[in-house]
Image (cartoon, rainbow, N blue to C red):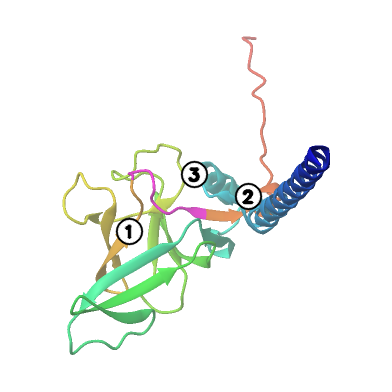
């Protein structure tokens, strides 16, 4: 009788082990599929775009190409917010929410939203992501509110929201109004411009070598 019980116990243990190994295998397979799915969704959009830098701008202009003909993109989600008075809740874009007893106008700029260049200056460019006069955001390579020195074109904020040592929120002028823009938790999180990599591949850089001159 004990031997029979032992055999049943061993058989039950073996079955439990088999089921456990099967469940672990299925879980591992599901996890691998999930990671592959994420890579399939995320990587294509990232791999086809590159940050717009001063060097790329110089090459574009050296090839007599206009910046207004380039397709630009924003590299991350951007949210602009401003408080409205109770008698001024009609807006041309975005949405109005009632939060903590106040009307808040919110304009959301989704990551990789396409934009066009509307103004070119020596050290900056204006890009519009929606139709309408004054609906432009300025980008430049150098900002006193950014800790990076990578020469990428980033949004130009007017000033930090509360004081000049706070880099999480900025005041920015858009469509004739002052909005609060959340740029991130650190000073290097300012939204930046991107372009298609295919544009870079089509640009040609001509280089010549000085041959020098000798005294005759």
Going 33% across and 67% down the picture, which residue do you hit?
80
User: Is residue 175 covered in magenta?
Assistant: no
In the picture provided, is 27 more to the left or to the right than 134?
right
Report the residue at 51% width, 67% height from top.
115
Residue 4 is at least partly visible in this image: yes
Say which element carries label 2: loop
- The C terminus appears in which quarter of the rendering? top right
In depth, the one of 21 and 60 nearer the eye is 21
| Upstream in sequence: badge 3 or badge 2 | 3
Q: Are marks 3 and 2 in contact (CB under 8 Å)?
A: no
Q: Which mark is residue 54?
A: 3
Q: Which residues are magenta?
A: 186-193
Tell whether 71 sits left or right of 180.
right
Residue 207 location, x and y as percent? 66, 33
- Predominant SS of the magenta segment: loop
Callout 1: helix, strand or loop? strand
Structural crowding at the residue carrying mark 1, measured as other residues with C-alpha within 10 Å and reported as few (<14), some (14–19) or many (≥20): many
């Amino acid at each position: 009788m004990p031997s029979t019980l032992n055999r049943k116990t061993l058989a039950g243990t073996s079955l439990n082990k088999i089921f456990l190994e099967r469940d672990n295998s299925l879980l591992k397979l599901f996890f691998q599929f999930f990671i592959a799915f994420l890579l399939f969704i995320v990587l294509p959009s990232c791999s086809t775009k590159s940050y717009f830098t001063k060097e790329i701008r110089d090459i574009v202009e050296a090839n007599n190409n206009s910046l207004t003909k380039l397709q630009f993109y924003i590299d991350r989600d951007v949210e602009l917010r401003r408080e409205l008075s109770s008698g001024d809740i009609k807006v041309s874009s975005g949405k109005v929410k009632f939060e903590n007893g106040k009307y808040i106008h919110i304009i959301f700029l989704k990551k990789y939203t396409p934009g066009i260049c509307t103004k070119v200056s020596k050290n900056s460019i204006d890009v519009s992501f929606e139709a309408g006069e004054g609906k432009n955001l300025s980008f430049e390579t150098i900002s006193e509110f950014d800790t990076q020195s990578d020469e990428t074109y980033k949004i130009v904020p007017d000033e930090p929201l509360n004081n000049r040592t706070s880099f999480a929120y900025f005041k920015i002028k858009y469509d004739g109004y002052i909005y609060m823009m959340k740029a991130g938790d650190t000073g290097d999180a300012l939204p930046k411009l991107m372009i298609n990599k295919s544009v870079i591949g089509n640009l040609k850089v001509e280089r010549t070598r000085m041959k020098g001159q000798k005294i005759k």
